[in-house]
Amino acid sequence: MIIATFNVNSLRTRLGIILDWFGANQPDVLCVQETKVQDHDFPVEAFAQSGYEFVFRGQKKYNGVAIFSKSPISDVSFGLADEPKDEARLIKAVINGITIVNTYIPQGYDRESEKFQYKLRWFARLAEYFKRHFKPNDSIVWAGDFNIAREPKDVYDPEGLWGHVCYCSEVQNALNKIMEWGFVDVFRRHCNQAAQYTFWDYRGGAFRQNMGWRLDYIMATKTLAAKCTNCWIDKKPRSADKPSDHTPLIAQFKV
């Protein structure tokens, strides 16, 4: 079973890239973030002939998540379900007996801003979401754009970038608490090399110089992570014409 995650930074803008990538790679499941499209404008017809089922939740201009699957999708829910209003940042579904949780975690903007506090609160709410709805021995894949670099080797300039909203102790600790509940970073099970990135800024020739960040993750509960046979980054979509600033991360599971 091949599961991928891709922050597309506008689904409609990147539609051709996504459809081409589907055709070339044929993942069983694709989690998408930053669709940036309201539900009534989602390009349903464009995906209707793709061979995939899909579910989505979006909002105008910002955020938005979707799951595409070759197999039937069931038990779909949206959001953290702990507040009456929430941004379009989480979608959960069950596919072939595996729970897929797709998240687009807040970026944080600035450590002195309310948006950073919102990011930390969102992580705390997510930790409670997992504790409330699941057990660590359940088969769960948690994927998406986490807006966190976990380790120094996950950023191109560890010293210079330390303290950034995506690379500081507060967010790393928040992620580690959820991982301690029972998640494994499956990419790091298969690759310990530095300079393995999923995001490059559009500015300053960052992609050409590999000045990137590893912000996108596929996590799995321990029993499922043990069945992950490979995990890799596909940089090709980032070199396409008018690309997203992220690129797909793919994991293969023997299930």
Image: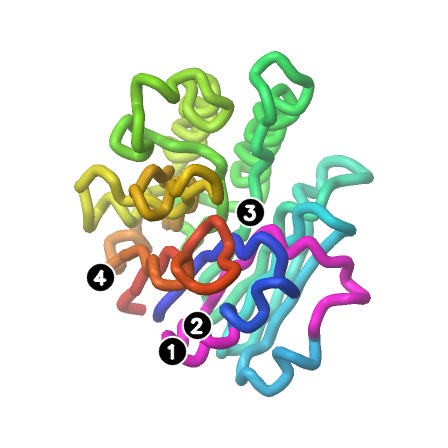
Could you tell whether 1 is left or right of 113 in the image?
Answer: left
Q: Residues within 10 Å of mark 3 (few under 14, many from 20)?
A: many
Determine the residue positioned at 43% across, 64% down: 240
Label 3 sits on what residue type?
Thr
Magenta-tinted stretch: 19-43
Q: Which of marks 2 and 4 precedes in the sequence?
A: 2
Looking at the image, residue 146 sits to the left or right of residue 38; the answer is left
Q: Which residue is mark 3?
A: 103
CA–CA distance in space, label 4 to label 3: 23 Å
Give the position of the C terminus as an image quadrant: bottom left
Give the alpha-carbon distance from disc 1 to disc 4, as whole Å.
20 Å
Residue at image coords 61%, 31%: 122
**Mark 4 vs mark 3: which is more N-terminal?**
3
Tell me: 215 left or right of 186.
right
In percent of width and height, residue 1 lies at 35, 70
Circle nearer the viewer, 2 or 3 = 2
Which one is nearer the viewer's eye here, 130 or 249?
249
Disc 1 residue type? Ala
How far is mark 4 from mark 2, CA to CA?
21 Å
Query: In the image, which is nearer the foreground, mark 3 or mark 1?
Result: 1
- The x and y percentages for residue 153 are 25, 32
Q: Specify the farthest residue to the top.
A: 112
Disc 4 versus disc 2: nearer the observer: 2
Instruction: Determine crowd level at label 1: few under 14, some 14-19, many 20+ residues with C-alpha closer than 10 A.
Output: few
Q: Report the residue marked by disc 4.
A: 229
